[in-house]
Amino acid sequence: QVQLVESGGGLVQAGGSLRLSCAASGSIFSINAMGWYRRAPGKQRELVAAITSADSTNYANSVKGRFTISRDNAKSTVYLQMNSLKPEDTAVYYCNADINTRLAMHGDYWGQGTQVTVSS
């Protein structure tokens, strides 16, 4: 059993910052790529940022230069530092991880989501 637990969402004014965290726990052997997605009201889910096990990163054009993804492998945790937030960043943010379990299984796991609301 593997769980991803997110934290750090909330309400912030435009121009402010938030830091999201996502900790993986359970029967984990190794974690490959980790990432953050978001779903805004009335829109499809989109990739925000991703990071590989080699720390290679990828960002949506809309967040480049404002958001930074990082990971702490010792803690099985991925972070998303969000600066210069805009009202259009308002969404539910979901953590995602590609995990190899101790039972030699491989799967794509999701967190429960955390709300980020940016007021204008």
Image (tube, rainbow, N blue to C red):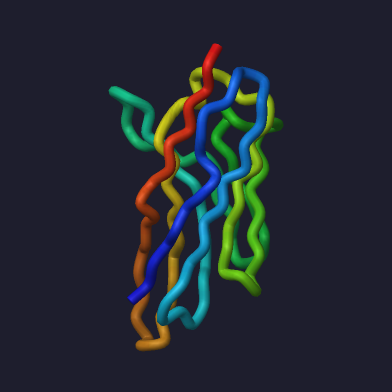
Image position of 66 (left or right of 114): right
Residue drawn at x 46%, y 41% is 47
Residue 61, percent across and down? 58, 30
46 up-or-down from 12: above or below:
below
Residue 68, percent across and down? 67, 43
Image position of 19 (left or right of 87): right
Q: Quadrant of the N terminus?
A: bottom left
Residue pushed farthest top? 120
Residue 112, percent across and down? 35, 51
Residue drawn at x 55%, y 11% is 120
Residue pushed farthest left? 42
Image position of 42 (left or right of 116): left
Residue pushed farthest right? 65
- Residue 72 sits in which quadrant? bottom right
Residue 26, percent across and down? 42, 77
37 or 14, which lies in front?
Answer: 14
4 up-or-down from 17: above or below:
below
Residue pushed farthest front? 11
Residue drawn at x 42%, y 46% is 94
Residue drawn at x 51%, y 77% is 30
User: Total number of numbered labels?
Assistant: 0
